Image: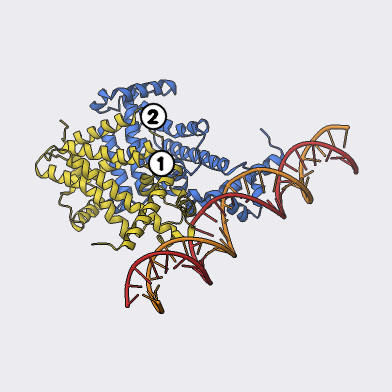
Chain colours: A blue, B yellow, C red, D orange
DNA sequence: TCACAATAGTTTACAGTGTACACAAAAATA
DNA sequence: TATTTTTGTGTACACTGTAAACTATTGTGA
């Protein structure tokens, strides 16, 4: 795995490009990733950048990949900061990390979950595995909690709608999630709500309605956990 | 209220500009609203457009206003299509209309709820009243259901977190919503989840997990309504 | 050590973007 | 009909992504 000097320099430059791109994104939005602006900040010509990323789209893809992995890192770290058998605490910690990451890296969050960038289409074979990493953290906790009899999915989940039920059963098998259908659905349902809260907060809609988004967020998660018999301590 | 011939022509042109902008937006994303492209499609010079909208931002603001009002129209229509005392059905109809509008006008939805457009900041004094119109439909139904003893908010809502509770109480009074705190919170909590589902569906994340987004959507709403003792018939 | 190949960089060009300014044409009004 | 208001044009500047041709630098094999 040793890199030649040239490869290392090249990797450095690629990283520098991404880091400047991230700064610009944070300052002026995801649609404002400009190769020319990056080159200017680096003291390079635009066309030199094309040696490192063959196009604007390739740079965006690299940024998206980094973002998904960084988010997954944050979630994994939060998970392992809690005692193994405190499932509710682990879930809360992970979801708080999810929100914290989204707020601290709002541009990256918009990049992966917000409006598509005009003309850009993410290559699914590259991004999907990266998305899954984060999701797997949550599923892992739920599976453990279920196996240990601590998780009791709502009775409604015993009659999931047919297509959803079939599709998710298939997904569980195919992706090798070691979890029954009901807790899996519970996870998806909860994730959707977190996502809604964070999206609205990020774009300044929640504060105007709810006052204190963090308090709101914690309260909602707690309620969701309670519906499955999970309580914090 | 009669308009002069000139005013009418002017209004026509303004509408034509918006409608072309909407088409471009639908085809290439919200960040691709280009005055030059619009002018080209109209057989006008760019600079002539400036007679109708003094800047790119002003055009965007007009589009946002239209979008909020169109969404509110759709919700109001859905509401009045149901019998007055069938509160659950009214709520379901309104939320289905919300989703249907979002999917059919996905660019407009992104415009009002998605990533901010680089450099653009919506003038709140113009947009906030438009947002409120749609929200008021839901609150109205909940207030009626509550007053008629049909709505039973979850027991958890009797102990809302302090800041949220204070802020929303203030908001209810200030905006003249005629509704108690608990059902109001129920509305917000539910809205957040709808929003999350729609956002994820719009950006192609839900289908990969859930298979059939509409089935998922209906099932989730139904469950939310049930937690407040509301049932469809 | 030197020649050659690979890599990294530059200059130039084209078509696109928002918008400011000076001017001409058309229409409504006095 | 003369004047004012409105609508439109043309030109200019600084910005965007990216393709092509060319030069300078660096690493490696003989």
**Is A91 in front, or is A192?**
A192
Residue reaching furthest to the left:
B148
Left or right: B206, with C6 as reference point: left
At label 2, counting other C-alpha atoms closer than 10 Å, the crowd grade (few under 14, some 14-19, many 20 or more) is some
Instruction: Kindly identify the residue that appears in the image at 60 percent across and 42 percent down.
Output: A55
**Is B5 in front, or is A16?**
B5
Left or right: A104, with C22 as reference point: left
In the rendering, which numbered label is found on residue B39? none
Residue highlighted by disc 2: B209
Q: Position of residue B206 (x, y in %)?
A: 38, 33
At label 1, counting other C-alpha atoms closer than 10 Å, the crowd grade (few under 14, some 14-19, many 20 or more) is many
Front label number (2 vs 1): 2
Q: Position of residue A176 (x, y in %)?
A: 44, 22
Cβ–Cβ under 8 Å for marks 2 and 1: no
**Is B191 in front, or is B87?**
B87
| Mark 1 belongs to chain | A
Q: Position of residue A72 (x, y in %)?
A: 46, 37
Location of the N terminus of chain B (image quadrant): bottom left
Residue highlighted by disc 1: A98
Instruction: Kindly identify the residue that appears in the image at 62 percent across and 55 percent down.
Output: A40
**Is B232 in front, or is B149?**
B232
Mark 2 and mark 1: Cα distance apart in space: 19 Å
């Amino acid at each position: 795995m040793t890199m030649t000097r040239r490869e290392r320099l090249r990797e450095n430059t690629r990283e520098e490009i991404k880091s400047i791109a991230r700064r610009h994104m944070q300052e002026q939005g995801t649609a404002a990733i400009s190769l020319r602006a990056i080159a200017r900040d680096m003291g390079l010509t635009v066309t030199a950048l094309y040696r490192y990323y063959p196009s604007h789209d390739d740079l965006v893809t690299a940024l998206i990949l980094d973002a998904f992995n960084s988010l997954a890192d944050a979630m994994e770290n939060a998970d392992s900061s809690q005692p193994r058998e405190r499932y509710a605490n682990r879930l809360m910690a992970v979801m708080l990390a999810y929100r914290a990451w989204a707020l601290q890296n709002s541009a990256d969050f918009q990049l992966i979950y917000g409006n598509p960038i005009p003309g850009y289409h993410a290559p699914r074979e590259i991004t999907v595995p990266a998305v899954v990493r984060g999701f797997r953290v949550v599923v892992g906790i739920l599976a453990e909690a279920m196996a240990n009899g601590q998780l009791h999915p709502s009775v409604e989940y015993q009659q999931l709608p047919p297509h959803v039920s079939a599709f998710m059963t298939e997904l569980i098998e195919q992706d090798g999630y070691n979890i029954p259908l009901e807790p899996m659905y519970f996870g998806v349902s909860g994730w959707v709500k977190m996502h809604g809260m964070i999206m609205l907060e990020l774009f300044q809609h929640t504060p105007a309605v709810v006052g204190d988004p963090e308090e709101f967020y914690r309260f909602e998660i707690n309620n969701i956990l309670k519906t499955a018999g999970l309580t914090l301590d």
